[in-house]
Structures are given as structure tokens and as C-alpha cells.
Amino acid sequence: MRKKLRDNSNETATMRLRQAGLRPTRQRNELAKLLFRDGHRHLTAEMLHAEAVAEGVKVSLATVYNTLHQFTQAGLLLQVVVDPTRSYFDTNTADHQHFYCEDENLLTDIPGPEIAVAGLPTPPPGTVIKRVDVVVHVRRS
Amino acid sequence: MRKKLRDNSNETATMRLRQAGLRPTRQRNELAKLLFRDGHRHLTAEMLHAEAVAEGVKVSLATVYNTLHQFTQAGLLLQVVVDPTRSYFDTNTADHQHFYCEDENLLTDIPGPEIAVAGLPTPPPGTVIKRVDVVVHVRRS
DNA sequence: TCAATAGTTTAGAATTATTCTAAAGAGACT
DNA sequence: AGTCTCTTTAGAATAATTCTAAACTATTGA
């Protein structure tokens, strides 16, 4: 019996889905297991689909798109907008920030305490602040 | 003779283009005049093209895309990534931040002093910080 | 246990923003 | 003016994503 760093059984995935109000189907279970197995990840739909296919999980790209959006709506994922041509999904839904390197198309979490954002501005009339995204753009030196 | 709030003559546009190292063609001149005539703006290629057409400027959508990218490279515009389906260009190239309202697809500058970002993190090895983007996502209340 | 039903998946077509191509057009320099 | 290079353009091509409607599957209640 192998030691598990993270409980990623079918039962866990199923529970996670039920709690989120999503019917635990085979595809959603499999995708949840892939997404949440190793620490935090930043994935595009294409990347997750390729990974699923590589591991022998039978799922269509359309379902991967649907699932990522459903998970995002349910608060299981965060959609991070940094690249005008791609959508990244982050398994870390806590308040945190990102480095983004355009040269290599690489999105990473900023480790450690978040950047302190002092003095939030007053939002435009009729709106409330939902969240603050901070992206530190870096360049290969 | 009308009073001008901002010098937006052909000569000014031409000068601006020459300084940026861009050949001042008719299309680039016209687009520059539209872009920089009234304070700061946040536009997509489609929006600028529609505006040009509405004002009787003969220019193709492909040229608008080319021009926006050339202006961005030349430092005349800033490309702001907030919407996974659209690219916005900002005529305000100074260091500043944005509000973004997904409900109405509206990008606005945060007025007044910028949000203080304390304690920039150490970038990943082999990279240097290029710029820090802060987007305050708001929701209609 | 089983059928009814309501939600889910899928292949493939459709859509949308954007980029490419290659031919025609227009500045710039002599 | 003539030549050269850069620019513009229409339309085709691409790429990510969404849509469609038919097949499938989890859930519920008899």
C-alpha cells in the first residue's frame, strides 16, 4: 500500500463534486482526480484534455471545456486571464497572485505572503469589488 | 477657428509616428487621430475599426490589427488582458491600474494615485520583472 | 429492480477573434 | 520619374472555444 500525499480516490472526487452540487459522472470524477492530485496546477483545456487522453481517460474536449467552466462556477477552480489567446485554470482558489512569463507561456503562483495591496480604490458607482488580480509580468533575462 | 482641447492635427499625428519609428501613412495617421483625440480610451480592434468606418476613414480590419500591435510595440499603446475573448488597447501608457466589470464588458482606469504595491516578490530565476498588472474585478451591485 | 426523467456527454459543425498570404499600392530616396 | 521597400488589403486560414442535437447515464420513485 502506497503512501498518499493527498487523498485522491474516487470517493473523494465524488464527495467534492456532490458538495459542489455537480452530479458525479465518470468524466467529472476522472478530471477532478487529474486536476487535484498534485499540489496546485495551471492548465488550459487543451492541456487537461491531452493529459486525460495520455492516461487513458476517455473524455472529449468539449466536456473538458464544460467541466472546467462548471468547476470554476462551483468555486473549485479559478480562471486566470493573462494570455489573450489562451485560458488558464488554477486549482488554487485561495487569494494569491501570479507571475506570467510571455516568453515561455508560463504561469506560476507567487509563493509566500501575497503582495500587500494598500488602499483599495472606490469602485465605480453601482458596482462592488469582486476580487483583485495581480499579475507580475516577467521577461527572460 | 475652433478651440482645441488637444492638438490632434495631421502634423501632430505624423510627428508622433515618426518619433515612434513608424512611417506615417494615411491609415496610421487617421487611426492615431482617432485613438488620441479625447483623453484616454480602451478599445478593441473591432471597436476602432467600426469607429473609423463610421467616420468615413477607409481602412481594413487587418490594418487596424497591424496598427494596434505596431503602436503597442512602439510604446504608444498598452495591451490590457482582462477578457479571454477580446484584446483591449489602452491609450494611457503610464503605470496605472484598471477596473473591469465583466457584467458589462467595461474596462476603466482607476483614477487617482495608483494602488500601492508593497514588497515586489523575487521573480523566478532567470527572469526580471517587466511590469505589474493590477485588475480590480467588479460586479454590478 | 426498473423504467421514467432530467442532466450529461459527444462528434462534428459553427462561431469568433485574430493572423496569414500574396498581390496591389504608396512613401521615400535618388 | 524610377526604384525600392514598406504598407495595405481582401480573403483565406487558423485556433480557441461554443453550439447542436442525438446518444448516454445517473438519479428517483414505483
Image (tube, coloured by chain):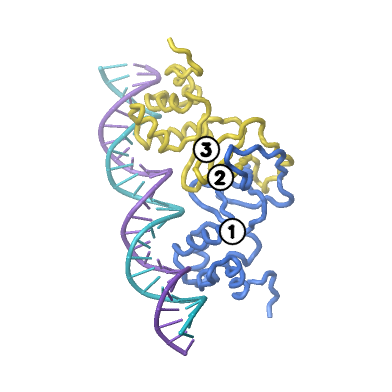
Chain colours: A blue, B yellow, C purple, D cyan
Residue B119 visible to an observer of this rendering: yes
Callout 1: 10 Å neighbours few (<14), some, many (20+)?
A: many
Instruction: Name the chain under label 3.
Output: B
Tag 2: amino acid: Arg
In the image, farthest residue toward the top: B1
Residue on which disc 1 sits: A77
**Res B79 label:** 3
Tag 1: amino acid: Leu
Instruction: Name the chain under label 1.
Output: A
Q: Where is residue C14 in the image (x, y as percent from the top left)?
A: 32, 55
Q: What element carries label 3?
A: strand
**Res B108 label:** none
Examine the rendered structure and indicate whether residue C25 appears above or below residue A49. Answer: above
Callout 3: 10 Å neighbours few (<14), some, many (20+)?
A: many
Q: How far apart are marks 1 and 2 (CA)?
A: 22 Å
Locate residue A6: give its quadrant. Answer: bottom right
Name the mark nearer the viewer: 1 or 2: 2
Name the mark nearer the viewer: 2 or 3: 2
Q: Nearer the viewer, residue A125 or B68?
A: A125
Query: In screen coordinates, is B68 left or right of A89?
Result: left
**Res B140 label:** 2
